[in-house]
Every structure is written in C-alpha cells, then in structure tokens.
Image (cartoon, grey):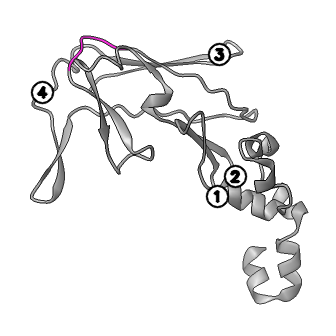
Amino acid sequence: MCNLARLNLAFRGVASSDSVWEKKLPPNYQELLDLFPLERYQNLSKKDIFALLSSPVPFNHGNKEVWLDRVTGRVCMAISARGLAITGIEDRRYWNWVPTEESRFHVVAYLQQIWWFEVDGEVKCPLPADSFTLSFRLHLGRFSKRLGQRVCTFEHTHRWEIKPVRFELFTSDGQRASSLLFR
C-alpha cells in the first residue's frame, strides 16, 4: 500500500488513513502512549502514533525502554542493569559502573569478582497477550582497545565453565521458563 502511495495520489490518502495504521498498532498502544505527556500525542494520527512509538520510549527513570518494531509492530523492551536488582551491585569491591557508548543506556555493570550473584527484574508495563522472545545479555571478559580495535580478554574470567548459568522467567500468572547455559 505504501509503495503504491508513492506512485498514485489516490493511494496516498488510503495509506495514511487511521484505519490502515490502527491495524499496525498493538492492542495496548494507548497504555504505551500514557508513558508520554498527553500533549505529545493527543492530536496525532495513527500513522504518527506508530512513528512515535517506533522510537525507544524511556520510562522508570530512564532505566527501561519500550518501542514498536517497525516491521512486525510488536512491542519490544530493554532493561538496563540499573533497572534490575543485582546482588551486591552497590558494593564497589565487586562491581563498577562503566560508561560506554556501546550500550543503549550508556553504562554497564562490570563485575570485578564475586562467587555468585542473582539478578531480579520486574516489568510493570502492559504487554499484549502474545508469545514473547526473551533474551539476556551477560558478557564474560573485559573490553579494551588495542591499536584502535575493540578487543575482549578472558584472562581474569574463571570457573564459568564448571557450573551453568541459570536463566529463569516467571510471569504473574504462574508460568515459568528456565534455561541452563555453560560458557
């Protein structure tokens, strides 16, 4: 439809109509809009609302972001380390906050040493009934720059190959998913 709108003026009006764009929005798009001040979206067309929600919308003091995938229209979310409860995170003997442009949140939690840790997070954002893909990013090793190239060293990474890392997800309705992973 959008490709035809470029060629023919009659299709341009149809391609911009609210009825076409409302079908691309998730059922809970109004709840996502509530993360914005009302004046930011109150007079927007559905096409403009889709465009607005297709860029990351920060919430929870900037520690979480939600956006719509432009291709599928599905809801995506990212949570920073600051948006999670991590064992010992405020103890500088074990953890440091490292600024980096490689993170969408511009900072990562760097673990110096510890025997175990747990990470807990909670999502209080209305997600539509659907199937979801959940991914965790835990990077082993330390980044540095050598000759202008970003490299990762594992010289101080020990014993991750002995015990697995367990990833678990619990939902408010009692569902549970678990995965074990060795390095």
Instruction: Return the residue at label 2.
Output: 73
Compared to residue 156, the image places residue 152 above or below, namely below
Magenta segment: 113-117
The quadrant where residue 107 appears: top left
Eyeballing the image, is 148 above or below 89? below
**Residue 8 position in % (x across, y down):** 82, 88
Badge 3 density bin: few <14, some 14–19, many ≥20, Cα 10 Å: few
Q: CA distance from mark 1 to mark 4?
A: 41 Å
Q: Which mark is residue 70?
A: 1
> In the rendered structure, are the residues bearing label 1 and label 2 in contact, judged by CB atoms less than 8 Å apart?
yes
Q: Which labelled disc corresponds to residue 111?
A: none
Q: Along the horizontal axis of the image, is 152 left or right of 81?
A: left
- Name the residue: 76% across, 55% down: 40
For badge 4, the amino acid type reads His
Q: Quadrant of residue 93?
A: top left
In which quadrant will I find the N terminus?
bottom right
How far apart are the two marked residues, 3 and 2, measured between alpha carbons?
Answer: 25 Å
Give the residue pinned by disc 4.
156
Q: Amino acid at mark 2?
A: Gly
- Going by the numbered disc 1, the residue's amino acid type is Arg
Name the residue tied to disc 3.
175
Counting residues from the start of the chain, the first of labels 3 and 2 encountered is 2
SS at badge 2: loop
Mark 1 or mark 3: whose residue is earlier in sequence: 1
